[in-house]
Image: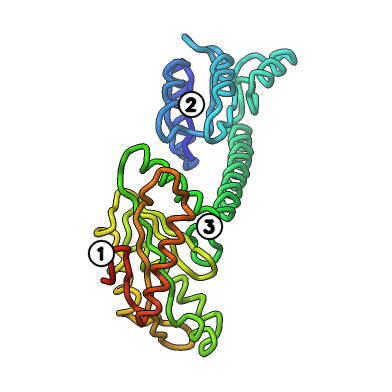
Amino acid sequence: MKILIADDDVMSCLILAKTLRGWGYEVVTSLDGSQAWTTLRGIDAPNLVILDWVMPGVNGLALCRRIRETGGTSYTYVILLTSKNRTEDIIEALEAGADDFISKPYEMAELRARLHSGQRILGLEKALLEAQQELARSATRDFLTGIYKQEEIELCLTRELDRAWREGSALSVILGDLDQLEQANEVHGYAAGDAVLVETASRMEAIIRSYDLLGKHEEDRFLVILPGCGLDVAGKVAERIRSCIGDRTFHTDTGPIAITMSLGVAARPPTRSSQHRDLLQLAEALLYRAKKQGKNCVVTAGGTL
């Protein structure tokens, strides 16, 4: 863990830094509060801070207040070092936002124990943030494949349509459906079918651009949103997807499964009043046409590829 030491006493700062490095910490030092503040506002700033109360420029107490007032994406654990040891001093330090308070002179064993307490708190905060991020992700992502859920991919489509109209840019969608998935579920079991869905999403993500959007749509269909792509380019992307699905078997625990995909490709509606439903209905009609034409093909508004 990285620690910032802010102390205007050069010798004390060097001794403490050497000790902390010996304990396995990565150490950054500052000789005044202003320099420490610059470090804390930088990239990859330390989350564990040891501040001397009395420093030139911005003192430790003022710096502690600034840290709390400004906040940040992650918590900064602050230990305040000072020769002051009155009860009112401790109260002032804690009210300024310090997490811990050590009076000088201090024992290194005590400092080490207090640093471990700070690490535990920061570890709990990290675990909480990761849990929150996972909850946010699970609200928008399909549990099985990790791609967007239907509700979220449709919201994305609405936003991308609005942006395309504002910027006067092209936008296309691809709606794909696995042709033999139902049979695969019946013959190999739903676990194998799930494995096919997961691998399908992975193969499609490898084909599309990093800023294209991929999501599930109505049971086991896949919807791709292609910002900036007209019908011709979108059709070529769809053909690459069709090929990457149908040209290689899917390996599952019950054996290899051959699956193909039919795809419908539609471009941005011609009128500003058109909603995302209009575009999806067109893509769905083209997908049905691909199914009727024998499956394993791409149909666009301009014809069959």
Which residue corresponds to the image point at 61% horizontal and 25% vertical from the top-left? 106
| Residue 10, percent from left and from top | 43, 18
> Which residue is tagged 2?
5
State the CA–CA distance, disc 1 to disc 2.
57 Å
Nearest to the observer: residue 89 or residue 187:
187
Q: Residue at x 51, y 82 (%)?
A: 182
Q: Looking at this view, is 159 or 100 the one in front?
A: 159
Please name the amino acid that badge 3 sits on: Arg
Mark pair 3, 1: CA separation: 27 Å
Give above or below for 14 relative to 217.
above
Percent x, y of residue 161? 41, 46
Residue pointed to by mark 1: 236
Mark sitting earlier along the chain (1/2): 2
Q: Secondary structure at mark 1?
A: helix
Q: Seen from this angle, which residue lies furthest bottom? A: 187
Q: The disc labelled 2 sits on which kind of residue?
A: Ile
302 relative to 69, above or below = below
- Give the residue at x 50% y 53%: 154
Q: Position of residue 97 (x, y in %)?
A: 64, 23
